[in-house]
């Protein structure tokens, strides 16, 4: 132990003496560094300032500070709480706000970031000036200004009133008819509007046309609020806004409507039939003394139209057999009669020998059976007038070689004639080399 101490103590003494020897050198270095720092601190601060300025300039070039106009949506609160009050003057929909900030921040702006909240639930009847102050929740954007700054609104009392519906009849009924007093259901409707608007309403009107009417008119029509001068009043809610109006029509005693009956004789050509008869107009009006009008039959006949041997439609002006003592209301003394004539449909069976097509050269063929029956459908006159060459049966042998084949015949018919069935549906053909027995 004593030997170890003898070794350690001299070492400690040596290091201590060396440390004391370099202390002045360390102190000198510290002093030099301190003097250098103090002498250059201004340059260091200037360098930092230039570096910050360079960074700021680069940032502003990439994302400059700009001003933009943005539409701020007005959010109206409390409309459903006004109850017996109503806004007569609507608020503007948007406020134009000027924002300032980095350009990239505008790209991130959302509709809900800029709002104008307006609470109207506590507004009483009268005129109010309401501030329109936008609220901005997007940083680092800053609100610079906005327009409009305020809005003037008028609040009025909401009034409900019951009014009868008045019917305005327009147009004239057919000659010899007179419109009776209209009936309305429901007779009254309920109006809801502000006190200021409802005082302008002189009546509730429904308009119904009876132009050319020969029988009662019934329509579901919309009703409108109008002033005493007949102008429409807007801002009025009407319940119900549709009413049913019925206007009876009365025929004058010296007028009478008579349906037109076409009188015809003869028959169309054989194989043809009448499929439709029409007349225009279908009803005519006669007038005269009451006794003569009441004595007329319940219809009026045309002069006789002949359809004998007709093979096409008939379309001609025909006079009317007007009863004695009465006259037609219209200047025209004729009506248009149209008789539609069409050929009757039927069927006919014909027998034809098949025609061979496409037989390769050097080959012969035997067809079994050698005749084919065809059931044809179409207009009877055309079926009866068919010639032998009008219906052909073709058997196509193209591409067939020697041997026995089953081939479906192809039937060619005139336009308007169809082959309903072909008997047999297929024929047997036996093809062999020419000169060789089949």
Image (spheres, rainbow, N blue to C red):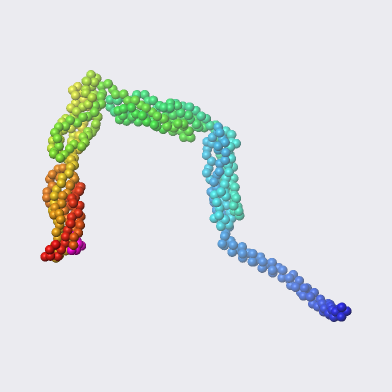
Any part of residue 215 in sight? yes
Instruction: Determine the residue located farthest toward the top in the rendered image.
Output: 291
Nearer to us in this view, 113 or 152: 113
Range of the magenta residues? Answer: 397-402
Residue occupying the point 14% across, 60% down: 365
Horizontal placement of 105 versus 245: left or right?
A: right
Residue occupying the point 15% across, 54% down: 369
The quarter of the displayed image where residue 57 is located:
bottom right
The quarter of the displayed image where residue 335 is located:
top left
219 falls in the magenta region: no
Horizontal placement of 249 versus 101: left or right?
A: left
Q: Position of residue 251 (x, y in %)?
A: 29, 24
Q: Position of residue 118 (x, y in %)?
A: 58, 42
Q: Position of residue 385 (x, y in %)?
A: 12, 45
Q: Is most of the magenta stretch helix, strand or loop?
A: loop
Q: Position of residue 376 (x, y in %)?
A: 17, 47
Horizontal placement of 23 versus 255: left or right?
A: right
* Number of dots carrying numbers: 0
Give the vertical position of 1 relative to 165 (above or below).
Answer: below
Nearer to us in this view, 395 or 416: 395
Instruction: Determine the residue located farthest toward the right in the rendered image.
Output: 2
Residue occupying the point 17% across, 58% down: 429
Nearer to us in this view, 307 or 66: 307
The quarter of the displayed image where residue 58 is located:
bottom right
């Amino acid at each position: 132990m004593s030997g170890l101490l003898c070794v350690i103590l001299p070492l400690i003494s040596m290091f201590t003496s060396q440390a004391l020897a370099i202390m002045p050198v360390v102190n000198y270095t510290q002093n030099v560094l301190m003097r250098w720092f103090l002498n250059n601190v201004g340059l260091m601060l200037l360098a930092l300032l230039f570096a910050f300025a360079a960074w700021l300039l680069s940032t502003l070039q990439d994302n400059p500070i700009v001003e933009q106009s943005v539409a701020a949506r007005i959010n109206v609160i409390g409309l459903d709480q006004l109850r017996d009050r109503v806004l007569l003057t609507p608020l503007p929909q948007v406020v134009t706000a000027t924002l300032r900030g980095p350009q990239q921040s505008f790209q991130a702006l959302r509709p809900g970031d800029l709002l104008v909240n307006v609470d109207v639930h506590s507004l009483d009847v009268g005129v109010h000036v309401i501030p329109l102050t936008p609220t901005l929740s997007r940083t680092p954007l800053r609100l610079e200004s906005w327009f409009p700054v305020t809005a003037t609104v008028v609040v009025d009392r909401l009034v409900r009133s019951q009014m009868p519906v008045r019917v305005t009849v327009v147009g004239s009924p057919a000659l010899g008819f007179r419109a009776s007093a209209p009936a309305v259901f429901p007779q009254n409707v309920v109006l809801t509007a502000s006190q200021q608007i409802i005082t302008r309403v002189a009546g509730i009107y429904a308009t119904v046309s009876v132009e050319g009417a020969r029988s009662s008119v019934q329509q579901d029509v919309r009703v409108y609020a109008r002033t005493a001068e007949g102008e429409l009043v807007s801002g009025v809610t009407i319940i119900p806004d549709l009413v049913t109006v019925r206007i009876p029509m009365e025929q004058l005693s010296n007028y009478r409507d008579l349906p037109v009956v076409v009188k015809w004789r003869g028959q169309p050509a054989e194989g043809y039939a009448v499929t439709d008869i029409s007349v225009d107009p279908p009803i005519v009006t006669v007038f005269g003394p009451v006794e003569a009008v009441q004595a007329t039959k319940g219809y009026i006949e045309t002069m006789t139209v002949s359809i004998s041997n007709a093979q096409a439609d008939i379309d001609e002006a025909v006079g009317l057999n007007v009863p004695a003592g009465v006259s037609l209301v219209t200047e025209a003394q004729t009506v248009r009669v149209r008789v539609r004539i069409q050929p009757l449909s039927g069927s006919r069976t014909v027998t034809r020998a098949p025609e061979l097509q496409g037989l390769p050269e050097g080959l012969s063929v035997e067809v079994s059976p050698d005749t084919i029956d065809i059931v044809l459908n179409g207009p009877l006159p055309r079926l009866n007038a068919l010639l032998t060459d009008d219906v052909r049966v073709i058997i196509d042998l193209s591409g067939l070689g020697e041997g026995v084949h089953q081939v479906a015949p192809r039937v060619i018919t005139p336009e308007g004639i169809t082959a309903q069935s072909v008997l047999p549906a297929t024929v047997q053909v036996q093809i062999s080399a020419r000169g060789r027995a089949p």
